[in-house]
Each structure stands twice: as structure tokens, then as C-alpha cells.
Amino acid sequence: MLETASDATGKAIGPFELGEVIGRGAMAVVYRARHRKTGAEVALKTLQVAEEWMATALRREIGALATVCHPGIVPMLGHGVARGVPWYAMQAVAGVALHRYCAGCVANALQVSGGGGGSWHQAVLAALPEILTAVRSLCAPLAFLHGEGYVHRDLKPDNVIVRPDGIPIIMDLGLAWRAGGTASSRELLERAGIVGTPEYMAPEQIRGEPVDARADLYSLGCILHELLLARRPFAAPDPIDVLRKQLHSDPETLRKVNPELPEELDNLVSSLLRKCPRDRPGHADAVASVLERLGASDRLAGAGPPAKPYLYQPGLSGRGAELAVLERAIKRLCAGSGGMVLLVGQAGIGGHGAERATRL
């Protein structure tokens, strides 16, 4: 088992010799590596601590990358098991993280304008075509991933690398899972707690509910908000407070901070950040269409296979009154009041025929 980067540097995994660490998370570590025979440079990902649920998550990521092939998603070049630990090699992508790329576009625009005081908002407007083009070019691989049945679940600026040619590449499918696989999601939640990055997590993901493509579109809304305002829509020193804001607070609208931003763009981001999935846009292509109207181009146009259509899990039907009671009870709970709600149902309607009491 590889426990630390210092233990692994200079050693071999499969046909690759490991170099320096180029990325590290709570679960895995990524090394710069070189194929011993061909000399090809890759990025190799493996675990850094011995936990079975982490190995399961990495195997799921390997399975996703093995079945997904799109020029906007990092390709896997090989995989295997070393000393009982899964690993995989992916293409080494040169570039910068999405937020750094967009910040650079704004900085360049600011420099061109002379960097005068109070001109940051104007610099954002000048850089807007580049920012929106980067996000629009991200929509096609995201739609393709969703069409293959996967939800990324950890979409954030650090997991998108923009190449020197301006093409964004989706990285790190470590939390990706098939939209129908609720059992594996719940198992992961039970073993590891809430999974994902709090600042970009959809409310339904925080609650441990089954998620679909609209959870990734919520994350995309968080990303757009951050890129355009240089601050995250939900921020707090404590991650628990961030999660609470994701569940119950509305962020500032774009035009409240920068009134010169287009109203249609403001409406798009607001719709992506709706708390209820059914109130958000339903497809990454719908987001791309709005960005196109706002002047964004698609640097991956025609470069990859078309996305397959996909369906969402049906919501509750005819339960408006019951849901209203529960929503009022939750609001009382958030306000500091207690109470009890009894859920009674017959067999086959979700309660297993048993009466349930939820103490608030």
C-alpha cells in the first residue's frame, strides 16, 4: 500500500515510473509518471490511504473513464492494481484550472483598459465572451457524460483544466456514479459522510438523495457565479455553514453586484441555483443555448460524439398539500422550534406500510 508520496516517488506502478506529486486530495494522490518503455508522460492516480470505500470509489472512477470517450473528458490510458490498490493513468493535460484561466482573462482586460480604479466590473464585461465560451465549451462533454448515465457530483473549477488552446477538459470522476445507482450512493454516504465539495454541492446531494444531471447543473451555476463575481455564491468559514446556506439561502444575483451584466445571464445563473431540481434547466445543452445567445462560441463544436437523451426520475404526484406541511415544519425547525410530523402510508407508496414519525 502506498501511504505517502515520499514512499512512492521513484518507484514503479505497472509500466510507469512515478515522479513528483502533482495533486492530492482527501482520498487519492496524483503523480507525474513516465512509461518505462515509451517514455510517454502521464498523470497516475492511486490511493494514499488504505480504506475499502476509497478503493470502491476509485474503481468506480476507472469504470466511468473506461466507458466514456469524449475530447472534453480526460482520457484514461491504462489501469491496474498494485499491491492490492487500484490505480489508473490518464493523459497529462497541460493548462490551468478554470477559475485561474478566467481570472487571467479579466486581468488581461483590466491591463488593456489601463487598470483604472473602479474598472473591475468593466474588465469582467470585456472578458465576458472568453469566460462564457469556456463554460459553453464545458457543456458538451457534460451533456455527453449525463447521456452515458453518469453524474459527476464534484464539478468545480479545480476539476476543469483549460488547455492553452482554450478547450476545457473535465477531470477527476472520483465521485461519478450512474444516475440509477442509488444503492451505491447511499453506501458511499454511509461510509464516508457527505461526499463532494460543499461550495458546489446541490441541496439534494447534501441531503443524501438520489441525484441526476441537474445536480451537476447546480454546480455549474455555482461555477458561473464565481467566475463572474470573483466570489462563491455560498461562502462561510465553516463547511457546515456552507452546507446550511446551500440548503436554505439564496445568493446575491449577478446584477445586484454588477448591474451591467446581461439580464439573461443573471436569469440563467439564478435558475441553475434553484433549490429544487425540477426548477432548474434540465440539460447542459439548454445552458449552452443561452450562452450562445449571449455571444459564447463552442471550441468543441463537432469534435465529439453527440450526447444521448436521458430521462429524470419522476417526482411526487398529487402530494402538494403534504409537501407543504413538511416544508412548513422544516422552516419551523430552522427557526428553532420543535415538533413532530407523522407520515402514514399504505404498502407500495413509499412507507413500506408502516407509520413513521419524524421528530423535528
Image: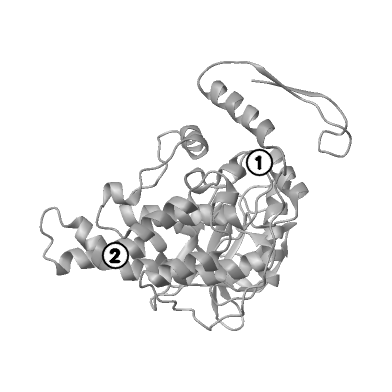
Amino acid on which the number 2 mark rests in the picture: Gly
Using residue 108 as the reference point, say whether residue 321 is left or right of it. right
Using residue 15 as the reference point, say whether residue 124 is left or right of it. left
Q: Is residue 231 above or below residue 78?
A: above
Determine the residue positioned at 53% across, 51% down: 25
- In the rendered structure, find residue 104 and report the number of the disc placed on it: 2
- Using the image as rendered, state which of residue 321 and residue 269 is in the foreground: 321
Q: Is residue 239 above or below residue 68?
A: above
Report which quarter residue 128 is drawn in.
bottom left
Determine the residue positioned at 64% across, 27% down: 325
- Using the image as rendered, state which of residue 12 and residue 360 is in the foreground: 360
Q: Is residue 349 above or below residue 137?
A: above
Q: Regarding mark 2 in the picture, which secondary structure is present there?
A: helix
Spatial CA distance of label 2 from label 1 is 36 Å
Q: Which x, y percent locates residue 350? A: 81, 38
Q: Is residue 32 above or below residue 1?
A: below
Using residue 274 as the reference point, say whether residue 183 is left or right of it. right
Amino acid on which the number 1 mark rests in the picture: Gly
Determine the residue positioned at 43% across, 40% down: 250
Can the viewer see residue 135 in this picture?
Answer: yes
Q: Regarding mark 1 in the picture, which secondary structure is present there?
A: loop
Q: Which x, y percent locates residue 188? A: 70, 45
- Give the residue number, with chain letter if any, for mark 1: 208
Q: Earlier in the sequence, mark 2 or mark 1?
A: 2
Q: Which x, y percent locates residue 48? A: 61, 51
Can the viewer see residue 9 in this picture?
Answer: no
Report which quarter residue 351 is drawn in.
top right
Q: How is the image coloured?
A: one colour
Q: Which x, y percent locates residue 205? A: 61, 45
Q: Nearer the viewer, mark 2 or mark 1?
A: 1
- In the rendered structure, find residue 54 and report the number of the disc placed on it: none
